[in-house]
Image (tube, rainbow, N blue to C red):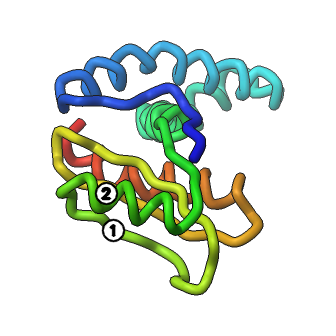
Amino acid sequence: METEGVFSFDTVGEARAAYERIGPAARTVVRETAKAMEFDREEYESRVTGDVVETARDALFASLLEVSVGTDDEFEAWRESHDYEVTVAGSDAVDHVVWHAAPFAEEAAAATFQNEREAAVGTLRRQAFGRLYRDRL
C-alpha cells in the first residue's frame, strides 16, 4: 500500500483551516492562468468571477487530498480495521483500490481500478471532496 498527497484531517476544523489557507493560492493560479491566456483587463473582470476562483480552490483542495493506493486485499484489511461508512465507485472485478478517509466524519470514499492509477486517484479525489468536504467547508 502507498500513500500520496498532502491533506489528511482528523477534524472538520483542520479541513476548514486548510481550505481557507489555499484561497490565496487559488486566486493566484486563476490570475496567472488568465494572464497566460492573454485576457485584457475587461475580459478578466467579466470572466473571472468569485465562482471561478471558488472552483479553482475546490479543485486545488481536492487535488491535495491524501489517498491510499493498494490492492483489493489491502483495502479490505483497512476497511476491517475502520468502522467507517465507505462509498466505493467502480467494479468489483479489478485488482486495485484508491481511498480517502475523513476520520471526523467516520466516512471514506474509494474507487477501484485495474491499470489507470492516475485517473483513479484524480477521480477519487474529486469524489471525496464532493462527498466528504463540500458541505462541511
Query: Residue 99, position in %: x, y?
Result: 46, 54
Q: Residue at x 24, y 22 (%)?
A: 14
Answer left or right for 20 relative to 10.
right
Q: Quadrant of the C terminus?
A: top left
Q: Is residue 69 above or below residue 55?
A: below
Q: Quadrant of residue 107?
A: bottom left
Answer left or right for 114 relative to 98.
right
Q: Amino acid at mark 1?
A: Thr
Query: Residue 128, position in %: x, y?
Result: 40, 52
Q: Residue at x 53, y 68 (%)?
A: 72
Of the two numbered discs 2 and 1 in the rendering, the one whose residue sits closer to the viewer: 1
Q: Amino acid at mark 2?
A: Arg
Query: Residue 120, position in %: x, y?
Result: 62, 60
Q: Residue at x 52, y 77 (%)?
A: 90
Q: How many marks?
A: 2
Q: Determine if residue 49 is in view.
A: no
Nearest to the observer: residue 24 or residue 1: 1
Q: Determine if residue 32 is in view.
A: yes
Residue position for label 1: 87
Circles 2 and 1: CB distance less than 8 Å?
A: yes
Answer left or right for 80 relative to 112.
left
Could you say which disc has been placed on residue 8 in the image?
none
Task: For mark 2, give the secondary structure.
Answer: helix
Task: For mark 1, give the secondary structure.
Answer: strand
Q: Upstream in the sequence, badge 2 or badge 1?
A: 1
Q: Quadrant of residue 51?
A: top left
Nearest to the observer: residue 107 or residue 30: 107
Residue position for label 2: 131
Q: Is residue 15 above or below residue 124?
A: above
Nearest to the observer: residue 76 or residue 123: 76
